[in-house]
Image (cartoon, grey):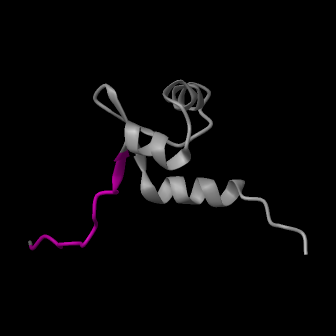
Amino acid sequence: MQSQHTNTQAPALVKFAQMREHLGVSRSGLYKMIRERRIPYKKVGVEYRFDRDEIKAWLDRRSVKARV
């Protein structure tokens, strides 16, 4: 029996400090968002990581369209 090889890539995970900088929030602000489960995140060991695609989708859902 042959195993099938798929081209699935691991998600691009962003570190906590990078996400703080990207969002422009303080350290305590990002921890609060995590604690209140307002932002999608993953826990890797004791550290928080953020999937780039999930964050992009999350930001897209939160955007407000301008009136024309």
Q: Is residue 22 above or below residue 43?
A: below
Q: Which residue is at 47% across, 60% downward? A: 53
For this rendering, which residue is in front, 25 or 41?
A: 25
- What residue occupies the far right of the structure in this picture? 68
Q: Which residue is at 62% across, 36% downward? A: 38
Q: Does 30 sit left or right of 60 as displayed?
A: left
Q: Does 1 sit left or right of 55 as displayed?
A: left
Quarter occupied by the N terminus: bottom left
Q: Is residue 21 above or below residue 7?
A: above
Q: Position of residue 4 (x, y in %)?
A: 17, 73
For this rendering, which residue is in front, 38 or 20?
A: 20
Q: Please identify the quarter of the rendering in which residue 3 is found.
A: bottom left
Residue 10 shown in magenta: yes
Q: Position of residue 50 (x, y in %)?
A: 42, 45
Residue 20 shown in magenta: no
Quarter occupied by the C terminus: bottom right
Q: Please identify the quarter of the rendering in which residue 65 is found.
A: bottom right
Q: Main secondary structure of the magenta part?
A: loop
Span colored in magenta: 2-14
Q: Does 11 sit left or right of 7 as displayed?
A: right
